[in-house]
Image (spheres, grey):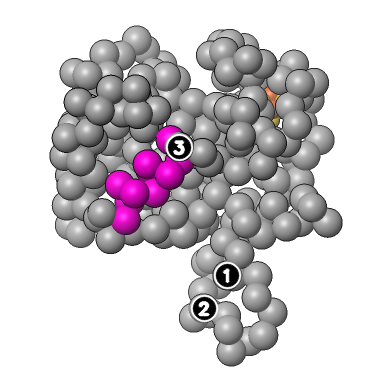
Amino acid sequence: MERYINLKRALGQKYFIIKDEMKPEKNSDFERKRALMIEIYKELKNCRKCPLHKTRTKFVIGAGNVDADVVFIGEAPGRNEDLQGLPFVGRAGNLLSKYLNEIGLSREDVFITNIVKCRPPGNRDPLEEEINACFPYLTRQLDIIAPKIIVTLGRYSLSALLGREVKIMKERGTIIDFNGIMLLPMLHPAAVLRNGGLNDKMRDDFMLLKEVISR
Ligand code: SF4
């Protein structure tokens, strides 16, 4: 039951309301995408493709709208995310929500996930073999959602997506082509919490995101 509640929270609770009059406008594409995402959820539940399954409390598939224009990708679940089964909770998550609100979006308007779905012990960086094992889930999620734009949060997720070393301070705030999808690298909110001087750069990047979405 708890898993089901987490699934509801992850994949858009409002869309699970049963009364017809409370459902959003019928959208067969949304239903198709949600069904495909639930398939991934079921696979993650039993996934043992890398050693991170041994130490996780809960896997974190992601959260938000499976039909979103924007997908945010972080590195990996941290301690709170591992406990709750949800991405970007805690102070960094609150800051992310604040930036979204400032451009007129909520977490329900976007989809938020990570490169790997289980927490690396002690919040260490995921190992290459762990990323390689988990990456196909992310690829499938992106295929399902088909967003207009991907936003990576922090150096690590950008590097994992592009498959090369990156300089996040140089590449943030620029639009990159990622297999035909726009990719906007941003700083990780946790970096802004550590260094308040980065706040303006983050705001600039969210303003760029707002502009790209409205094109
Ligand atoms: S991190 Fe990904 S590949 Fe590894 S066990 Fe978790 S879901 Fe499976």
Of 162 and 101, the residue lying toward us: 101
Residue at 39% across, 58% down: 106
Q: CA distance from mark 1 to mark 3?
A: 24 Å
Q: Give the camera-side residue of 171 and 141.
A: 171
Q: Nearer the viewer, residue 3 or 175?
A: 3
Q: Is residue 105 left or right of residue 54?
A: left
- Confirm or deny contact between disc 2 and disc 1 (CB under 8 A): yes
The residue identified by callout 3 is 91
Please, what is the three-letter code of the amino acid marked with disc 1? Lys
Q: Which residue is mark 2?
A: 24
Q: From what the image shows, is residue 70 above or below residue 12?
A: above
Q: Residue at x 30, y 36 (%)?
A: 183
The foreground one among 41 and 206 is 206
Label 3 sits on a secondary structure element that is helix
Which SS class for mark 1?
A: helix
Q: Are marks 2 and 3 in contact (CB under 8 Å)?
A: no
Q: Secondary structure at mark 2?
A: loop
Q: Is residue 44 left or right of residue 196?
A: right
Residue at 34% from the left image edge and 22% from the top image edge: 194
Residue 6 part of the magenta-drawn span: no
Residue span colored magenta: 92-101
Where does residue 9 sit, x and y in percent of width and height?
A: 62, 56
